[in-house]
Image: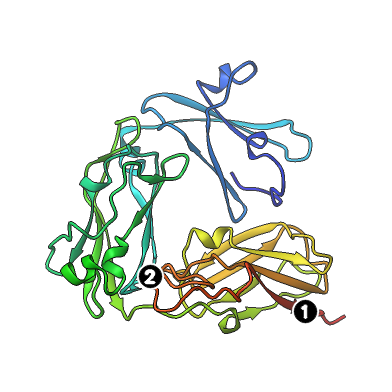
Amino acid sequence: MQLKEPLGQRDPSNVLQVFVGRTDACCDGKTPIVGHYRVVGRRLEFDPTFDFVFGQSYAIQSRDMASGDAIELTEFELHDDDRSFLSQVTEIYPSGPEIPENTLRFYVHFAAPMQPHASADFIKLMDSSGTPDTAAFMSFKQELWNADRTRLTVLMDPGRIKRGVVQNRALGPALREGASYSLVIEEGWPSANGGQKAPRYAHPYTVTSALRTLPDIQLWQFDTPGLGTLEPLRITFDRPFDHQLLQSSIRVSDEGGQLVSGTISVSDHEKNWAFRPDQPWASKSLQVIVDARLEDTAGNNFRDLLDHVQTENAQTPSLLTHTLHLKSLPE
């Protein structure tokens, strides 16, 4: 659904609802399908908790954002031609072609909720000859899924990353500088209801030198927006950061200390962060507030290195701030 204006603090379920059944029998007295909403730019998207069923009719009801009145009712039905598009990998992070030797985690995004307790069977780290490393990843009793099981966090075994520990000495690092690897999701991973199986997906990487320095906000480049505009505030990092943590670890406040509402986007293989406000910038100065626990792709945050060569930097505050003065537009 295309939004005519920013969603702001509105409940997305009051703007867009999906029902089982045809439009001629919708929607009073019916309970909408439960699922997850997300805003991508000016588009509101809905992912059902359980897969849509092929051959079943569904009704989509959109409502006016101001009045809440129903303004449009449309119907759709999934056909066999749509089957291959439901259960599949959509993104893997880190998204770039290069990763440091001590990369800590990967995020695998799926188009539909997936069956849990299957990652060990389907996710492989393969070298350039196609040989999998069966000891590359941490093994958990409970896999690290998001609430609707469309995003899985895959952790490299820290014992393969930290220098001097038994596993590292015995097996060496799982990723070696200068070598090429692929994170592979093998064909056949079933969706949550077992109705579809995901096709094979592979993301190739070239490994660069390890990241073993603390992040430093002084190395970031800030592109300041203009006062009274909807221009995004952009930050270019000196290194790639953790994609998921970038969604919540950087905030923006006005000169009165009030948090500014807006939309975050991450690009350039997790090296660029942008914040577009819901309303035109009204404050002459801004504070960019960074949680010191924000990690780069190697798991280093602003206070501590994953591979402990030094003790924790206790002098670093829990929140880091950077002040920006907005550009005045010519009259």
Q: Is residue 61 above or below residue 30?
A: below
Q: How is the image coloured?
A: rainbow
Residue 205, labelled with which disc? none
Left or right: where 166 falls relative to 59: left
Question: Which of 100 and 308 lies nearest the eye of the viewer?
Answer: 308
Q: Quadrant of residue 61?
A: top right
- Residue 59: image quadrant is top right
- Amino acid on which disc 2 is placed: Gly
The picture quadrant where one finds residue 212 is bottom left
Q: Amino acid at mark 1?
A: His
Q: Which residue is mark 1?
A: 325
x and y, in percent, of residue 284 in the image: 83, 74
How packed mark 1 is, by other alpha carbons closer than 10 Å (few <14, some 14-19, many 20 or more), is some
Q: Which residue is at a point 77% across and 59% down the rendered structure image?
A: 279
Quadrant of the snapshot with the N terminus: top right
Q: Residues within 10 Å of mark 2 (few under 14, many from 20)?
A: some
Q: How many marks?
A: 2
Closest to the observer, 261 or 168: 168
Q: Mark 2 or mark 1: which comes first in sequence?
A: 2
Spatial CA span between label 2 and label 1: 32 Å
Q: Residue at x 36, y 28 (%)?
A: 54
Per the image, the residue denoted by label 2 is 96
Q: Secondary structure at mark 1?
A: strand
Left or right of 60: which side holds 161?
left
**Residue 219, percent from left and from top:** 56, 84
Q: Which residue of the protein is positioned furthest toward the right in this rendering?
A: 331
Work out whether 130 lies above or below 21.
below
Question: In the image, what residue occupies the spot 22% across and 65% down?
Answer: 167
What percent of the width, then of the height, locates residue 121?
Answer: 21, 45
Q: Nearer the viewer, residue 11 or 240?
A: 240
